[in-house]
Image (cartoon, helix red, strand yellow):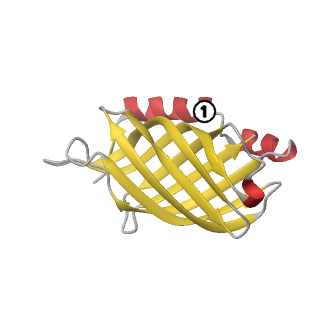
Amino acid sequence: MRTRNPILTATLILMVVSSPVTASALAQSRQAGGEVIACTLKVTQAARPPVQPTGKAAGKCAAFGPVNDVGTSTSTFTLVGNPPKSVHGTNTLTGKTGTITGSFQGLTAPVSFKPGPTPTVVEAVAIAKWRVVTATGSFAQFKGKAAINAAYQNNATRTLKVSILLP
């Protein structure tokens, strides 16, 4: 049985609605020549603070905008604090025409969980600011900051879906 925390759900809805990465923002970025990078990752090492605060994820990504590319993505992240937790880390996207690495800092919180002696997060979301650290090839034109949204499902594949919006 899944339990939803109404206070956290309301907080997360507010976080996502106030986040710069909305469907409208994505459409406006595309019209203005911005780049959208979408990734589907599998969490390969779950973060379980305080014993194991660092996690890893890897998977596929695609870029849409001035650069159209497909490739792989790897991420490392650290969770700190109580929900909503602070999350920070790095994300590298390696496409056929270039590579872009960014660092991110933001918040994440569970949307639903399975109750029990040790509650298990079933779904979580995150919003963060992403900053380009290095960019090569077709991604070399991108500098500065971006926005990132992520949604996590603790299912059989521990799926993490990430959208990055580069202006």
| Residue 128 location, quadrant | top right
From the viewer's side, name the closer residue of 58 and 23: 58
Determine whether, in the image, residue 106 is placed left or right of residue 123.
right
Residue 144 position in % (x across, y down): 68, 37
From the viewer's side, name the closer residue of 167 and 108: 167
Determine whether, in the image, residue 10 is placed left or right of residue 97.
left
Instruction: Write down the residue under mark 1.
Output: 17
Residue located at (77% from left, 59% from top): 138
Determine whether, in the image, residue 34 is placed left or right of residue 90.
right
Residue 159 position in % (x across, y down): 45, 61
Residue located at (73% from left, 39% from top): 25
From the viewer's side, name the closer residue of 16 and 138: 138
Q: Residue furthest left?
A: 117
Residue 157 position in % (x across, y down): 40, 68
The N terminus - image quarter? bottom left
- Type of amino acid at the residue the image marks with label 1: Val
Say what secondary structure mark 1 lies in. helix
| Residue 155 location, quadrant | bottom left
Q: Is residue 72 above or below residue 48?
A: below
Residue located at (32% from left, 55% from top): 46
Residue 165 position in % (x across, y down): 68, 44
Residue located at (36% from left, 68% from top): 156
Determine whether, in the image, residue 15 is placed left or right of residue 146.
left
Q: How many numbered discs, if any? A: 1
The C terminus - image quarter? top right
* CA neighbours of label 1 inside 10 A, class few (<14), some (14 to 19), many (20+): few
